[in-house]
Image (cartoon, rainbow, N blue to C red):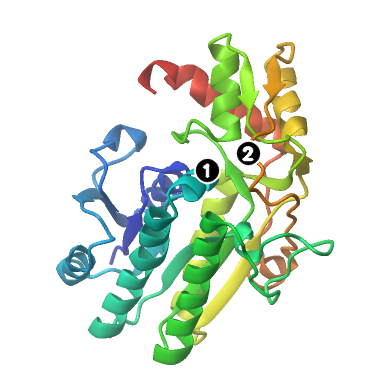
Amino acid sequence: MKKNFLVTGGFGLLGVSLVNFLLRKKSKVVILDYKSNRKHFFSNTKNLKIEKGNFCDYKVVDKILKKYNFSGIFHLGAQTQVLKGLNNPYETYKINVFGTINFLEAIRRRKLKIPFIYSSSDKAYGELKKKFYLENDKLDASYPYDTSKSSSDLICQSYSHTYKIKVGIIRSANIFGGYDLNLKRIFPETILSILNNKKLLIRSSGKQKRDYIYVEDVSRAYYMLYQFLSKSSSKLKIYNIGSKYNFTTLQIVKKIYNLMNKKPNFIVKNYSKSEIKNQRLNYNKIKVELNWKPIFNLDTSIIRTIDWYKKNIKKI
């Protein structure tokens, strides 16, 4: 019997990768998204259904959980932009916090025994005060986007502990790859600036350090976490997903220019100061417990990402 999954944010960077991963596993997938139909993102659509709707509306969430017999839910949908969070905190909290609560509450009321996999973030930890973040570190965010992820993360834990819901939480490093249509993120913005022969404007100081991880490694981790929870008596599992590639924004930008054989052409504006300065994840726990580790080389992954934008620049 084929497994049937619900994926929110299925047209986003991670969503497209995960949906394609699930379809390759011969699973059925339902995407819940308020955006228009983007089936051309997917290689095989015979097992894919698109449900248009906003998960900020509890009735929409409850209706879709009633309509389908899901094997698991991957909640990736969110407002993901730090600057948008600063400019519109209310909308960020509404989407990221209350959208998540809607799923947890619908699962609770319907007494569903399926894994709910929540897409958290390394930003939920707040500013790094030691060498690495560990899964049992206190969530101590300050800025609106970061705090929205901390809040939702803790709420997921609360529902799991209190109502025995199976919850998996992944706190991921900075993800990159093709299909990222948030064009103000550093990878698409740098690549498109080069392809369009434009000067890149770096809004921050460029000195913030982050782990960078290719999206295909991340989607594989999500599926492995689902598999574990579906077979285990565990009700809650939390994992960091990171890599050995910890670089500043400027280092990543210069690497992209180098791999595209272009002379750097950017200016550092340094007017976006409300960002965490340094982040790094210890991901030994998932390596030991689920036997997951990143397998994609950084340069190879960046070249694959560049190639996607070259092929799709006219469609963006």
**Which residue: 31% across, 40% down?**
44
Disc 1 to disc 2: CB gap under 8 Å: yes
Q: Residues within 10 Å of mark 2 (few under 14, many from 20)?
A: few
Query: What secondary structure is found at the residue carrying circle 2?
Result: loop
N-terminal of the pair, mark 1 or mark 2, is 1
Q: In which quarter of the image is residue 279?
A: bottom right
Residue 36 x %, y %:
23, 38
**Residue 153 showing in the rendered view:** yes
- The quarter in which the N terminus is drawn is bottom left
Instruction: Decide which of 81, 50 is in the foreground and name it.
Output: 81
**Which residue: 23% across, 82% down?**
110
- The residue singled out by tag 1 in the image is 83
- The residue positioned farthest toward the right in the image shown: 131
Residue 305 x %, y %:
57, 30
Q: Quadrant of residue 141?
A: bottom right
| Residue 234 vertical placement versus 187 (above, below) | below
Residue 11 x %, y %:
36, 43
**Which residue: 17% across, 72% down?**
66
**Which residue: 27% across, 76% down?**
106
Q: In this view, does 152 lie to the left or right of 282?
A: left
- The residue singled out by tag 2 in the image is 272
| Residue 182 vertical placement versus 193 (above, below) | below
